[in-house]
Amino acid sequence: MSQERLKIEVAKAAVREVEDGMLLGVGTGSTVKRFIEALAASGKRLEGAVSSSEETTERLQASGFKVVQLNHVGDLELYIDGADEVDAHKRLVKGGGGALTREKVIAGASRRFVCIVDASKCVPLLGEFPLPVEVIPMARAFVARKLAGMGGQPALREGFTTDNGNLVLDVRNLDLVDPRKTEDAINRIPGVLTCGLFAHRAADRVLVATESGIETR
């Protein structure tokens, strides 16, 4: 089964987590794109959706869903999003699409976070995928030096600006054996908005598309 087909299957499985009338948080990425398509095809209605990116907002609105601002609602009942890596403890690396800060805010505001991935994203140890770090532009070089001092190899994501108007450093070779500790250390660097480690706010459930079906963690 192709990776694209696996994304479609896990997206359909995620729709079963959604109840009519929900306030739903929606992430960003190729698997989430398939989720929005499947949700629209299901006929389920939402009270509203809080989007993690301009890209997702456009997709939701084009599918007939009302997009609302997080500032105008209370806690969300459910957040659906993908990930670039998932470990056995449901901790994640996210941000390949550059929406990591908004994704982390929405995850924190949601009672349940269901992560949807294909089996290629499941790893024994986080860190093979470069860790995205969102930084304000004037702090780029300073933050890069600090990340290098932690043993990482930061590289500017060329030609990319986040929806918040900031830059992304993609960092290889960081020690992520203790992802909570590393998440805290990076987030303490002045100029960093957040990093793509979702260790403190891990997923509550992970749906994994495999060749033999959907596995739930």
Image (spheres, rainbow, N blue to C red):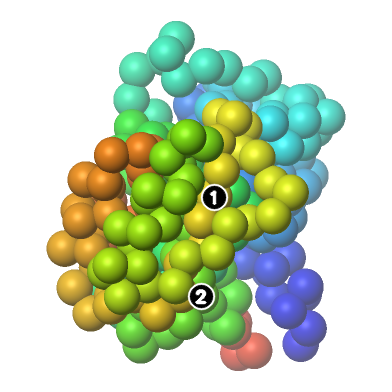
In the rendered structure, the answer to whether residue 168 lies left or right of residue 64 reads left
Answer whether residue 27 is visible to the viewer in this image. no
Query: On the image, which quarter does residue 112 sit in?
Result: top left
Residue 160 in the image, given as x and y percentages of width and height: 69, 46
Mark 2 neighbour class, 10 Å CA radius: few under 14, some 14 to 19, many 20 or more: some
The disc placed on residue 4 is: none
Of 25 and 38, the residue lying toward us: 25
Q: Amino acid at mark 2?
A: Phe
In the image, 148 versus 184, the foreground residue is: 148
> Element at badge 1?
strand
List x then y, in percent, for residue 64: 78, 25
Query: Given the image, on which type of amino acid does mark 1 rest?
Result: Val
* Residue drawn at x 37%, y 50% as measured from the top left: 143
Q: Residue 129 appears at what percent x and percent y?
A: 51, 75
Is residue 186 visible in the rendered image? The answer is yes
Residue closer to the observer: 177 or 76: 177
Identify residue for label 2.
Answer: 129
Helix, strand or loop status at disc 2? loop
Q: From the viewer's perspective, is residue 123 above or below residue 9?
A: below
Residue extending farthest right? 62
Q: Residue at x 78, y 83 (%)?
A: 2
Percent across and percent down for residue 29 are: 66, 53
Q: How many marks?
A: 2
Which residue is under mark 1? 168
